[in-house]
Image (cartoon, rainbow, N blue to C red):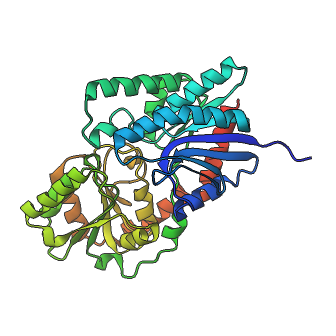
Amino acid sequence: MPSRKTTVCWISSARYSRPLEASAARKWQLVAQLRQYELRVIGFATSLRPRRFQENACFYLLPQPAFAALRYLTFLVLTPPLLLAVVGRHDVSILVAQSPFEGAIGAFVKTLARLGGRRLRLIIENHNNFEEDLFLQRRIPMQGLFRWLMMAAARFAFRHADALRVISTSTAERARHYAPSVPQARFMTFSDSAVFRATERRAPLAAAQDIVYAGVLIPRKGLHHLLNAFAQLEQPQARLYLVGGAENSDYARALQEQASRLGICDRVRFVGAVSQRQLAERLAAARVMVLPSLSEGLGRVVVEAMLVGTPVIGACVGGIPDMIRHGENGLLVKPGDESALAAALDQIFATDPTEMGANARRFAQDFFTPEKYVAGYRQLFELSMR
């Protein structure tokens, strides 16, 4: 007789389409390799229409309002009763909250379940500097009150955690500060690495002239510093491609105005959001990828760039130094230091980066593999059940 599966439910504010977008589909296909676990996911739909469907996991998707404040309210109001229903109907044993704030809802449901004689395990994932990152992304009304509420929720979540998932040295340290005795499993966020591994460079690295940034356009990513540094680069053939969605539209407009003031409009391209395959091709055509973040949990795009043999210039914050070995597979600069960033760009163009690119690819091929990702969740679930 087959053994009974353990049911795991993710609590996430991530957005999912039906059918799943290709990269998300591959992620959940990987996690579903853990055959002894039944997977359920609470998240957001891509529209105001709620959805429920099965695709390697069972997805319960909340309606997604257009405005961020309404999304927070929708998540706060609808997730607890939905989670309670899923827990009760499907005998959930493990909750996985994809941030400490979602973890507060998990902790609340765990407490209610305990009153009813049920034991739930709570895993909290820490992917970033949750104390500051939101305030570096957009302007928040009543910031002081909002910060107090956020941190109260995070502390409540950590007090009820049974295991923690971290992705870098910095996120591990922050999680340990709030929950020093809770066991941790450390592994990188999912990357659709097969796409990047399979992408070949169409021209030698030394002949490339493109500089690429990949990520959303928000103040936390430090793109205003990158534009100022790029304006100092005396390489008329160089082009800067900013690849990613304008999550903060005011900031995106300010970047375009800044490029105009600096006289570099003809050399800066705002590409917008692209598929993983398009991103891989763009990175494979670059001489260097730049991640000038002011705060960063890890920065998986560093690994993705390295997988196609492109070295990376990164700010020395968060988990970026876990991946970039200065002078070997990329260059590290102080966050916000435009002179240092300009000098790093000069160095990439003044020297042949071929060896640096080869080192980058070797490092990335070992740093993230699908096997390590699956093994990370296996370890995490086991830690939570001890």
Q: Position of residue 305 (x, y in %)?
A: 40, 64
Q: Position of residue 224 (x, y in %)?
A: 19, 53
Residue furthest to the top in view is 115
In this view, the residue in front, 40 or 67, is 67
Q: Is residue 106 left or right of residue 69?
A: right
In this view, the residue in front, 81 or 170, is 81
In this view, the residue in front, 324 or 67, is 67
Q: Is residue 220 left or right of residue 29?
A: left
In this rendering, does residue 52 appear at all?
A: yes
Q: Is residue 106 left or right of residue 279?
A: right
Residue furthest to the right in view is 1
In this rendering, does residue 161 appear at all?
A: no
Q: Residue at x 69, y 37 (%)?
A: 382
Which part of the image, by quadrant, shows the C terminus? Answer: top right
Q: In the image, is residue 214 above or below residue 76?
A: below
Q: Position of residue 48 (x, y in %)?
A: 46, 50
Q: In the image, is residue 107 above or below residue 310?
A: above
